[in-house]
Every structure is written in C-alpha cells, then in structure tokens.
Image (cartoon, rainbow, N blue to C red):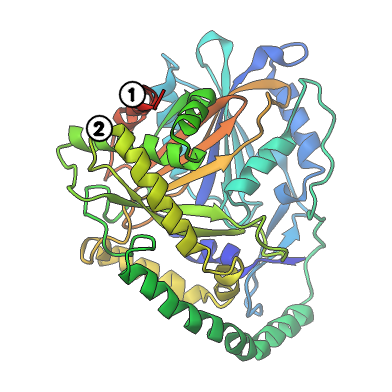
C-alpha cells in the first residue's frame, strides 16, 4: 500500500467531467524497425512484458469510506491488459490533422478510477505504414518528468532492447489494507495535523513580506490576476482540440548560444512569437504581455519522497506585445531571471507540504461551483495559459521495437486558462504538443504552424 501525497491527490479532487486531469503523450513510430516488422499482437506482447515489471502500471486507487486521509495505491489483483490497450484505425487520409482530431477526442474522456489510471491507444492507418501511440496517464500518478521517464522505461536504445530494471524508488504494492490499518493511519494523520500546521506556518508568514517587497520593487515574477483577458480565458468543457509541431533542437541551441541565454528562454521566446501571430490572426492581441504558468520540477531540489508529483511553478511574462524577435529574447532573459530568483525564495518542499492538507470535499464542491457560476469570466484573469518545458532522452529510442520519430506531450487545461503548450526535447528534435479547450480555441493548427515561422524569426535575428 502506498498513500498518495496531498499534491498527487489534489489532481483527483480538482477533476470534473469538464476539467479532466490526465496527461497524454503522442508518439509517432516507424513500425518497420520492429524485428519481423510491425504486428499488433507482437506489439501488445512486448508491452505486457514491460507492464509486468513496472508497478506504476498495475496500481489502482483504494479509497473506502473509513479512509479519512488521502487515497492509497494498491495492487490490482484483477489486472487485465485488455482494459488498457486499444487498437484504432485512423480514418482516411490519415494525416496529422486526422490524428490530432482523434487524440483530442480521447484526451477529453475521463479515466475509469476502478482500474489503474492509464490507457494506451495504438493508432494504425498513418501514411507510409507508420503508426502512432497515445499514452494517457492520470496526473495523480505522474508529472511531466515522471511521464518522460516512464516512456523511457517502456522504450529502449535498440529495437530488441532487454526488459528494463525497476525504476529507483518504485516498489510493488501490497493487497488491500485492513480497515483497522486505514483507521489507525487516518487518526494518526488527523492528530498530527495541528502540529504540522504550527511547523509550516512561520516559514509561510516569513515568506509573504519578502515576496511582497520584491513584487512592489518590480524585481519579481508577474502577479496573479493581472493577466490581460483573451478568448483563451474562460470556462471550459470536456471537449478538446489538439495540434502538434516538431522543430530542430540544434536550431534552438544555436539561438541560445548566439544570444547567451538559456534553452528555456528560447522556448518561451519561440512560443511568444507564435502566440503573437496566432492572436493577431484572431484580432485579439493584447497590448500587455501574456502571463503563463510554468511548472518547474523540484526532483533535484528535494531529498524527500513527495509521491509522483514533485513540482512547483512560477509565473512568466510572455512578450507577445513586442514585434521584434530579438527584443522578445532579451525581455524573457531578464524577466525569467527575476521570476526564478523570486520563485527560489520558496522552499522546494513548501507546495507539497501544504498540499497535504487539501480537503477532497471542499476542492470538489469548489470546482463544480466555480464552473457552474462561470466565475473564470467574472474575475480578473489569473494567467493566460500553461507552458511546460520537459527534457527528454537525448538519444534515439525504440518503443517496443518501433523507432520513435516524434514525441508530443499534451498537458491538461483548467477553468480560466484553456490552452496548454508542452515542449519536450529528444533525439535532436523538439516536440511541441498543443492542447486546448475546444469551445475557447477550436483550431490550434494556426498556432502549431506559427511555431516554425517563429523559429525562423529567432534564427534570423540571432547575433552573428
């Protein structure tokens, strides 16, 4: 038995039919590299071998009425791979837009909490004999870095790579815990909660004035509720739109070196340029910078086990108001430096520590009321969108024997911020996954098509 951390469990509590909180990874594959060529039964057999040694794929939620704490993970003693692996034929013409439309439909469907919280869709019918896989996992069980790692464990460096070793920190789950054990642990947690609050409160109270001073002096990150309103910022439903793009990693690194900035600065400049063109095309480019929430991994900043999600986040100004691409890079380099310094004032464990107190009933009722009353359209905009930048394996990978030719992560959207852009670099390429709330942004392909143009802009503007 493994108990979910408060941060992991919060993704369960905040989920509704319209705000689905799983993450997806779209992989395009060259099936001809599989020994003997691609065949679905062989692909599924190889997947079963790996699922058998990775506990994260066979654990399910257990949350009976007598559990007064966060849910626990337990081994699914009736695990059946057929509940999780699905074979789909892509309708003609089988191009990227057809693939994205199918992925959008799948991404809008909730995972069944009676089973382990993941699904794998093998999609056939792409041109030239290619295929695709859409892997869907709940955010309660994985974050961006963890998702990239899990794909790494399913894949190998060669088409006939051996089975992976068990990831560090992974362990097999026991069967169902007894009622007495759950009651005892729940009572222990409730008894210790006041002492935990007393321990954490001084640090939080000391942080508030420090943060406020940096904000007032203009030396910190953007302030929530100050983002300009766009059509991306409203109440969402369960319908999704998807698009994706692939760029050259060397081009990103060349721009980074030419400007003397970080890869993350270039990624945000790239996205800012594409968003500028996208919003100009919709006739709604605001005169102020957009504000993005940027999740940040704290895997390397903490030595404590906080469960599957080890993340924090900061707010970033996106200079969509600046027409000059070089000016956007310099703006971001300075703004990101200030935001990161501001963000690093927060202890890496603070978010996870306070999330331990997240109440399921309050979160659930709050999100439903927020959606029903359409409050996202009635208060100032917290942030415009979410942007994630996740490092992936730098070498070629073979998923169950099939060479990975494209990897596009698709993160969730929330009420008030109906666009998620997630960037992942691997094998000399940069995959950009775009997922939106369909009622707010029906067609994301103009934004995806603007990304290569924004990359060209940056390359031409780079100092020689």
> Do the CB atoms of the residues marked 2 and 1 lie less than 8 Å apart?
yes
Q: Decide which of 6, 121 is in the foreground and name it.
A: 6
122 over 312 or under it: above or below: above
- For this view, does 273 lie left or right of residue 138? left
Question: How many numbered badges does the structure rendering display?
Answer: 2
Q: Decide which of 110, 457 is in the foreground and name it.
A: 457
Q: Residue at x 36, y 67 (%)?
A: 368
Q: Secondary structure at mark 2?
A: helix
In the image, farthest residue toward the top: 128
Query: Residue 247 location in percent, x, y?
Result: 47, 24
- Identify the residue position indicated by label 2 in the image: 277
Query: Residue 402 location in percent, x, y?
Result: 68, 20
Q: Decide which of 47, 247 is in the foreground and name it.
A: 247
Q: Decide which of 187, 149 is in the foreground and name it.
A: 149
Q: Which mark is residue 384?
A: none
- For this view, does 327 lie left or right of residue 188? left
Going from N to C along the chain, the mark reached first, 2 or 1, is: 2
- For this view, does 449 lie left or right of residue 162? left
260 over 176 or under it: above or below: above
216 over 396 or under it: above or below: below
Binning the other alpha carbons within 10 Å of mark 1 as few (below 14), some (14 to 19) or many (20 upward) gives some
Look at the image and tell me whether residue 241 can be seen.
no
- Identify the residue position indicated by label 1 in the image: 453
Q: Residue at x 26, y 33 (%)?
A: 324
Query: Residue 104 location in percent, x, y?
Result: 42, 37
180 over 64 or under it: above or below: below
- For this view, does 331 lie left or right of residue 123? left
Distance from label 2 to label 1 (Cα)?
Answer: 9 Å
**Quarter-of-image position of residue 192:** bottom right
Q: Residue at x 27, y 42 (%)?
A: 320
Q: Secondary structure at mark 1?
A: helix
């Amino acid at each position: 038995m493994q108990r979910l951390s408060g941060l992991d469990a919060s993704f369960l509590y905040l989920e509704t039919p319209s705000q689905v909180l799983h993450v997806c990874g779209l992989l395009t594959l060259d099936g001809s590299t599989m020994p003997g060529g691609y065949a679905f039964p062989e692909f599924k057999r190889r997947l079963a071998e790996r699922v058998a040694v990775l506990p994260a794929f066979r654990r399910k939620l257990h949350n009976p009425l007598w559990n007064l704490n966060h849910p626990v993970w337990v081994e699914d003693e009736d695990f059946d791979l057929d509940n999780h692996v699905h074979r789909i034929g892509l309708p003609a013409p089988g191009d990227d837009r057809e693939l994205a439309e199918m992925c959008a439909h799948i991404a809008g469907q909730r995972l069944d909490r009676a089973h382990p919280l993941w699904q794998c869709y093998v999609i056939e019918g792409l041109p030239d004999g290619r295929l695709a896989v859409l892997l869907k996992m709940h955010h309660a069980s994985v974050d961006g870095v963890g998702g990239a790692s899990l794909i790494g464990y399913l894949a190998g460096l060669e088409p006939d790579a051996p089975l992976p070793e068990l990831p560090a920190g992974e362990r097999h789950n026991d069967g169902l815990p007894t009622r007495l054990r759950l009651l005892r642990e729940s009572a222990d947690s409730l008894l210790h909660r006041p002492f935990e609050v007393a321990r954490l409160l001084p640090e939080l109270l000391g942080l508030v004035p420090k943060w406020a001073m940096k904000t007032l002096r203009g030396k910190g990150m953007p302030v929530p509720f100050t983002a300009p309103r766009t059509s991306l910022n409203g109440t969402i439903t369960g319908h999704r739109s998807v698009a994706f793009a692939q760029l050259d990693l060397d081009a990103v690194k060349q721009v980074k070196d030419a400007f003397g900035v970080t890869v993350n600065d270039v990624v945000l400049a790239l996205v800012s340029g594409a968003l500028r063109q996208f919003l100009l095309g919709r006739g709604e480019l605001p005169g102020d910078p957009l504000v993005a929430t940027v999740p940040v991994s704290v895997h390397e900043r903490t030595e404590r086990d906080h469960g599957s999600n080890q993340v924090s986040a900061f707010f970033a100004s996106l200079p969509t108001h600046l027409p000059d691409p070089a000016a956007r890079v310099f703006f971001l380099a300075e703004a990101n430096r200030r935001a990161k310094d501001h963000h690093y004032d927060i202890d890496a464990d603070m978010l996870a520590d306070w999330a331990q107190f997240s109440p399921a009933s309050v979160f659930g009722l709050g999100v439903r009321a927020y959606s029903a009353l359409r409050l996202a359209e009635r208060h100032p905009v917290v942030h415009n969108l979410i942007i994630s930048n996740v490092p992936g394996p730098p070498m070629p990978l073979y998923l169950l024997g099939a060479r990975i030719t494209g990897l596009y992560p698709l993160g969730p959207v929330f009420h008030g911020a109906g666009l998620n852009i997630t960037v992942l670099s691997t094998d000399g390429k940069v995959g950009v996954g775009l997922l939106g709330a369909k009622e707010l942004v029906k067609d994301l392909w103009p934004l995806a098509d603007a990304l290569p143009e924004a990359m060209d802009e940056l390359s031409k503007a780079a100092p020689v």
